[in-house]
């Protein structure tokens, strides 16, 4: 459990006081954008809280030749951003379940003004589902299942 929320996933590597998560990327030098775009910060936050560790690393490898590898340390700022996104998502879901209203702010003032909110809402929902269900990080060779 992470607060009132049940979480489930497959951890790649739990070391002595640290976690390592393997990821593939188009570019090692631009991996920080993948952390944001694919909500890896939420996943890092969830894993560090569930296992009670403070150190989180991504073992990153490029998808194309020369397949450059890198070890990227997750900063405290990134973990904090993941915590804020996680808590915001939980608040939105609880509000939706309580009130039945949309968890996304949509404004129809003009023809296209609502579009960024809708895109952001779907992106956030997609990130939440990926992070809470950990669908993006299943390792069939040696998964370490977590359910709390």
Image (tube, rainbow, N blue to C red):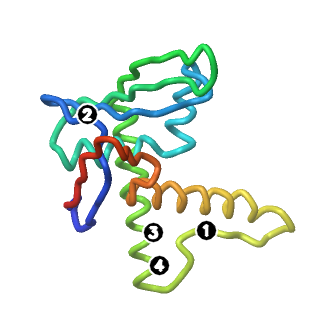
Q: Position of residue 143 (x, y in %)?
A: 29, 46
Q: Can you say whether 34 is above or below 118 in the image?
A: above
Quadrant holding the C terminus: bottom left
Nearer the observer: mark 2 or 4; the answer is: 2
Q: Which residue is mark 3?
A: 92
Which one is earlier in the sequence, the residue at label 2 or at label 3? 2
Q: Are marks 3 and 4 in contact (CB under 8 Å)?
A: yes
**Residue bearing the label numbered 2:** 19
State whether residue 53 is above or below residue 106.
above
Front label number (2 vs 1): 2
Q: Residues within 10 Å of mark 1 (few under 14, many from 20)?
A: few
Of labels 1 and 4, earlier in sequence is: 4
- Residue at the disc numbered 4: 96
Name the residue rendered at 22%, 60% in the picture.
Answer: 147
- 19 or 86, which is in the foreground? 19
Mark closer to the chain start, 2 or 4: 2
Q: Quadrant of the N terminus?
A: bottom left
Q: Quadrant of residue 111?
A: bottom right
Q: Residues within 10 Å of mark 2 (few under 14, many from 20)?
A: many
Gap between marks 3 and 4, in whole Å?
6 Å
- Residue depicted at x 31% and y 39%: 12
Distance between mark 2 and mark 3 Cα atoms: 29 Å
Which is more N-terminal, label 1 or label 3? 3
Q: Is residue 95 left or right of residue 14?
A: right
Residue nearer the viewer, 27 or 100: 27
Task: Identify the mark at residue 105; answer none if there is no mark.
Answer: 1
Residue drawn 39% across the image and 19% down it: 71
Q: Position of residue 112 (x, y in %)?
A: 83, 63
């Amino acid at each position: 459990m992470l607060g009132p929320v049940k979480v489930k996933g497959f951890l790649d590597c739990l070391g002595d006081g640290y976690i390592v998560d393997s990821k593939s990327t188009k570019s090692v030098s631009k991996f920080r954008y993948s952390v944001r775009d694919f909500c890896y910060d939420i996943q890092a936050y969830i894993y560090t809280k569930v296992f009670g560790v403070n150190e989180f690393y991504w073992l990153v490898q490029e998808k194309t030749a020369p397949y450059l590898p890198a070890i990227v340390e997750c900063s405290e700022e990134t973990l904090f951003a993941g915590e804020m996104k996680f808590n915001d998502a939980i608040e939105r879901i609880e509000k939706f379940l309580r009130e039945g209203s949309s968890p996304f702010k949509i404004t129809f003032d003009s023809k296209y003004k609502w579009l960024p909110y809708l895109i952001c809402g779907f992106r956030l929902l997609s990130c939440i589902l990926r992070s809470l269900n950990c669908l993006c990080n299943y390792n069939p060779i040696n998964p370490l299942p977590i359910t709390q």
